Image (cartoon, rainbow, N blue to C red):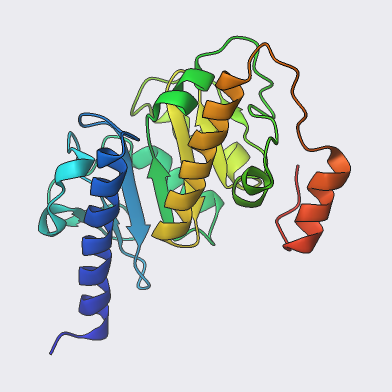
């Protein structure tokens, strides 16, 4: 019989592979872009390997890391390990992180003149409920160690950030929660692009505050 910790690790490995395949098949990531990670109760964590297609993940080959990011098993982790570690350090409540190069949110990240404190309007209540406010991280090359510091400065106050000319990073209390949130972010980015040039009626501050009170959401900064 498997121990409880081994059974949990096996379940999480299979879940990462299943959700990765779902994201890939629905066009939310392409080629070998994007990466997922999730923490185990004992402090170890799993991460998708470098140059891995999310649609073809082998649960047994996911990178297993200890609490100090030392590789314990599996293939080498994604070069974006730094941004995942920074998000976990800033958000102890986070149990999983999803980073994608999804088309519409990546397109938003390339626009000039974005409000660095709030990249997307609150077009729907679901964006407020799952993301809240989306700040912009200035451009860094993929895998740049300096990206960690930039993320730590914001992630303590935000569950998601947008990397300039790159794409979103979203944390959640579970792998499913992080996945659902990044899907909502992508849909909001799509709406924002579709509505460009048209009169738009985003939620007003009173409506946003009502949602935050009604669903006991984190305060906005």
Image coords of residue 218 (percent x, y): 70, 55
Where is 106 relative to 34, above or below? above
Q: Can residue 129 be seen in this view?
A: yes
Image coords of residue 131 (percent x, y): 60, 45
The quadrant in which residue 42 appears is: bottom left
Image coords of residue 199 (percent x, y): 75, 18
Image coords of residue 196 (percent x, y): 63, 15
Of 161 and 43, nearer the camera is 161
In this rendering, the count of numbered labels is: 0
Query: Given the current orientation, which residue lies at the most extreme right position?
Result: 206
Residue at x 59%, y 9% (from the top left corner): 112
Of 128 and 71, nearer the camera is 128
The quadrant in which residue 121 appears is: top right
Residue at x 78%, y 29% (from the top left corner): 201
Where is 100 relative to 72, above or below? above
Residue at x 64%, y 17% (from the top left corner): 114
Q: Can residue 151 be seen in this view?
A: no
Query: In the rendered view of the protein, which quadrant contains the N terminus?
Result: bottom left
Query: In the rendered view of the protein, which quadrant contains the C terminus?
Result: top right
Residue at x 69%, y 21% (from the top left corner): 115
């Amino acid at each position: 019989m498997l121990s409880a910790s081994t059974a949990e690790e096996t379940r999480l490995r299979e879940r990462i592979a299943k959700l990765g395949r779902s994201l890939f098949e629905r066009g939310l990531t392409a080629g070998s872009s994007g990466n997922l990670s999730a923490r185990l109760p004992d402090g170890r964590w799993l991460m998708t390997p470098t140059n891995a297609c999310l649609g073809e993940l082998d649960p047994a080959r996911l990178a297993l890391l200890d609490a100090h990011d030392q590789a314990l098993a599996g293939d080498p982790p994604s070069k974006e390990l730094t941004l995942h570690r920074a998000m976990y350090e800033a958000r102890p409540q986070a149990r999983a992180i999803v980073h994608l190069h999804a088309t519409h949110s990546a397109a938003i990240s390339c626009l000039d003149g974005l409000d660095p404190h709030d990249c997307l309007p609150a077009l729907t209540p679901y964006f407020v409920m799952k993301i809240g406010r989306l700040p912009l991280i200035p451009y860094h090359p993929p895998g740049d160690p300096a990206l960690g510091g930039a993320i730590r400065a914001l992630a303590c106050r935000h569950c998601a950030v947008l990397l300039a000319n790159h794409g979103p990073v979203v944390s959640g209390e579970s792998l499913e929660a992080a996945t659902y949130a990044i899907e909502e972010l992508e849909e909001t980015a799509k709406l924002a692009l579709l509505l460009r040039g048209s009169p738009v009626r985003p939620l007003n501050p009173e409506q946003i505050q009502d949602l935050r009170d009604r669903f006991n959401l984190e305060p906005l900064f």
